[in-house]
Amino acid sequence: MIKNLTLLLFLLLANKSFSQQINDSNNIKIYGKVIDATSNKPLEYATIVLKNSITNKLSGGITGIDGEFNVEAPKGTYEISIEFISFKSKKFPKQTITKDLNLGTIKLSEDTSSLDEIVVVAEKTTVDIRLDKKVFNIGKDLSIRGGNASDVLGNVPSVQVDVEGNVSLRGNENVTILIDGRPSALVGINGADALRQIPAEAIEKVEVITSPSSRYDAEGTAGILNIILRKNKLKGFNGSLQLDLGYPERVGTAFNANWRTEKWNFFTNTGFRYNETPGSSYYDTKYVNPTSENINRIIETRNFDRLGRSIFTSFGAEYYLTKSSSIIGNIIFNGGNDDDVNTNIIDRFEPNGNIKQATKRTEDESEDEERIQYTLDYVNTFDDSGKRLSVNLQYSTEVEDKINFIPEIDVIADFTDEIEEVIESQNEDRALLQIDYVHPVGESIQYEAGYRGNYRDIFNSFFLEQTDFKNNIPTEVLLDNNFNYKEFVNAAYFQYGQKFNNISLLAGLRYEYTSVEIDQANVSVPKKSTYGNLFPTLNLGYEIKDGENMTLGYNRRVRRPRGRSLNPFPSRSSEANIYTGNVDLNPVFTDAVDLGYLKRWEKFTLSTSIYYNISNDSWERIQEDTGETTDNGDPITRRFPVNLSTQERVGFEFTLNYRPFKVWNINSDFNLFNVTTDGDYTNPVTNKTQNFDFQNTAFSLRLNQKITLPGKTDLQINSNYRGASQSAISQTNGIFTMNIAASKDIFNEKASLSLNISDVFNGRRSERTTIIPDFSEQYSEFQWRERQIRVSFVYRFNQKKQKFKGNRDYNGGDNDFEG
C-alpha cells in the first residue's frame, strides 16, 4: 500500500512539474555554489540577494550544506550579491537575465577588517527546510538564556518536553537524540537528566528529522533530534562570557570562545551550574475492595528538594592539513553532584473515612555522575564538485553512583519503624566508528555510501539493606542485583540522489545487524540474540515555484529495548508501586509516511505536514494487581512493558512565521494527531483479560512572540498548551505554560542584560487519572520544577552585533541531497 501511494504521488508531482514548466515560462533560475576561498569547503547559509533594478524588490535564497543554491525569479534586470557573515561579499554587475544562469563556483574570502562586527548569535531564530529535515537555528532566543538543552528543545516546533523532562516529537516519545550527528554519552543512560546538564549557550542549532535518510541510524520511530554544539570558526580570537542568577537559588556561568589562525582553530564551551529545583507530587488512590488491613484509600504527598551542581566543558581543535582536508579533535566533560531530600507523607484511610495509619518516608539521596567523550574526525573535500570523505571515531564513558538513606516514621505512634539504605551504580561505555563517502556526478546526481559500527556496554548494580523495627523485633532484608547489557550494531547504507528540473529525489537502503547479550545476576546462562533488518528510505521534493515546495518521505524505523526496559529486577522508589523490565521484550518496527508543504509570502511563512505511522508489536506498559501487600498493608501494583498491540498514528501539523511589523515577529506551531491501539492482555495470576483497544486524539499549540521596544530592548513571550490525552487505562489533563523574557543591549551593544520568568503561572503540572478495572482508581499530580526567575548578563569580546545587509530572512528553501 505504501509503495503504491509513493509511486502515485511521485507521478502526480512529475505531471505537475511538467505543467508548471509551461506556466512558468517567464521565470528563470540562477544557480551555483559558494565555497571558502581558503579551505575550499562549502559555505552553508550563505545568502544570495537579487535586487530588481526596476522595482527595487529584493528576493533570493540561501545555500545548503553543500554550498549549492538554486533560486527562481521572473525574467528581468538584476543586481546579484553573494554574502556570508564575516566574509567579503561578491557582487555581480547589473545584467538583464532572460534564461537560466549558472554562476559557477563562487569563492568568498574572510573579511579580517570586520572582526569587531562579527555575529556569533543570530538576531532571530531561522528555519531551513530540507528534503528530510528542518533546521532550527537557535538564534537570540531570550527564553532559554541561562537554561539547558531541555529548555532549548521545549522551544523547537514539533517538539514537546513534559514536566518530567521526557522529550517527544509530534506526540511520540520514541525519538532518538543525537549530538553532532552521532549517539553520545551526553544523553546517556537517563536522557531527561542528562539533557538538563547541557547549557543552552553551548547549542548552535537543532535539526528536526521526521523523515531520516538512510545515512542516519534507524533507531527512533518518531524520528531524530540532532543537537549541534557550537564550534565557531571565525578568524582571530573572539567569544562571550555569561553570568546567571536565579530564584529558586541558581548561579551559573558560561564561556564560549574560539581562536583561529591560518592552520589551527581552537574552540571551547564551558559552563557551571548551581541550582535548587523544588517540586512536588500528589497521589490519591481509592481501592474497589478494602485491603486486609481494612484500608480502602491511600493519599501520598511528596515534596522534592533538589540541589544540583554541574560543570560542562567542551574543548576542541581543528587542524587544516590542506585547503580541502582537516582533522578535528574534541573532548567533552560533564560532571555533576546532586544532594536531594525528598519527603513522602502517606495517609491510609478506613472505609468510614477515619485515618488508620500515617507514615513519613524521607529519602536522603546523594548522586555523583561523570561523562567523558573523546571524538576524532577527519574530513577531506576532494574538489569543488562536493566529493567528500569523512571518518569519525568516538569513545565515551559514563558513571552514575547513588546512595539513598530512607528512614520511615510511624507518625501516629511516633517511632521509626523501618530504615532502608540503597546503593546503586550505573556505568556505560560506548565506541563508534563511522565512515561516509559522497560522490557527485555532474550537477544533478549524487551517490553516497557509508558504514557505522556502534558498541554499547551498560552495567547496573543495586544493593538494598532494609531493617524493619515493627513489633520491636529488628528484621533485616538484603537484596542485590547486577545487570549487564551489551549491544553491537553494524550498519551499512547506500543512497542515490538526483534532481529532475523542479523535482529532487533521495532514495536509500540501510542494513543493520544487531547483536545483544544480557547477563542477569542469579541467571546461569546469559540471554543472547541477533537479528538483521533492511530499512528503505525515500524522500521526494517538488519546487512548485520560488518560495513554494512540497516534500514526500517514507522510511522504516526501529525501537530497540534497552536497560531499564529489560532489567527484571523491581524498582524500589516505592514499596506499593514497583516497575520491572521484561527480558523477553522484542524490538518494534515502524513504517512512516510524511507529506509536507511550504509556502512563503512577503511577511508570512507557512509549513505544513501530514504524517502516518504504523507499528507492529508495539510496547504497552501494563499496570496490574500483584495480589500482594506491603508490611503496611498497601496493595502492591506492578508496571512492566510487553509487546502487545498494533498502533497507528496519523497527524497534521503546521508552523507559521508572521512578521506584521519590523518590530514584531510571531512564530506558532500546531500539532493534531490521533492514535489507535489494538491489543489484549491476560493477567497470568488472576486470569483476567484487559482490553487495550483505544483511540486518542490530542493536540499541542505553541505561540512565540518577540517585540522590539525602544531603547534597544527586546520582549519575548512564549505560550504553550498541551491538550488532554488518554491511554487504555489513564486520562491526562491539558497543561498551559507561559514564559516571559526581556533583554536590553548595553555598553554600545557589546553586552546584554536579560530577565527570564519560566512558567509564569506556576502551572506546569501533570494531572492524571488512572483506572485499573476491578482494583483501583488513582488521581495524581506531578510538578518536577516550580516557577523560576533568572537574570543573565552576557558580554561579547571582539564582537559586535552586525546589521544584516539586504534581506536575509529567507529561512532556507533549498532542497539538497544532504541527509
Image (tube, rainbow, N blue to C red):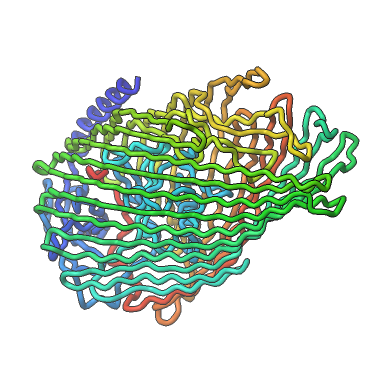
Q: x, y percentage for residue 436?
A: 20, 45
Judge by depth and name the residue closer to the eye, 222 or 813.
Answer: 222
Give the side of residue 304 with respect to residue 92, left or right.
right
Q: How many marks can you see?
A: 0
At 84% from the left edge and 40% from the top edge, which residue is drawn? 349
Relative to residue 479, is residue 763 depicted above or below?
Answer: below
The location of residue 94, given as percent across then percent down, is 13, 61
Q: Nearer the viewer, residue 54 or 579?
A: 579
Q: Residue at x 27, y 34 (%)?
A: 540
Asked if residue 661 is positioned above or below residue 519 in the image, the reply reads below
Quadrant placement of the N terminus: top left
User: Could you tell me residue 376's position as x and y percent?
Assistant: 25, 57
Instruction: Please name whichever residue, 512 or 535, is drawn nearer the observer in this view of the structure.
Output: 512
Question: In the rendered view of the protein, which quadrant contains the C terminus?
Answer: top left
Is residue 294 shown to the viewer in this render? Answer: yes
Residue drawn where x is 40% and y is 50% of the image? 604
Give how far across and how far down residue 234 sits, in percent.
25, 69
Q: Nearer the viewer, residue 538 or 572?
A: 572
Q: Is residue 55 visible?
A: no
Q: Residue at x 41, y 49 (%)?
A: 428
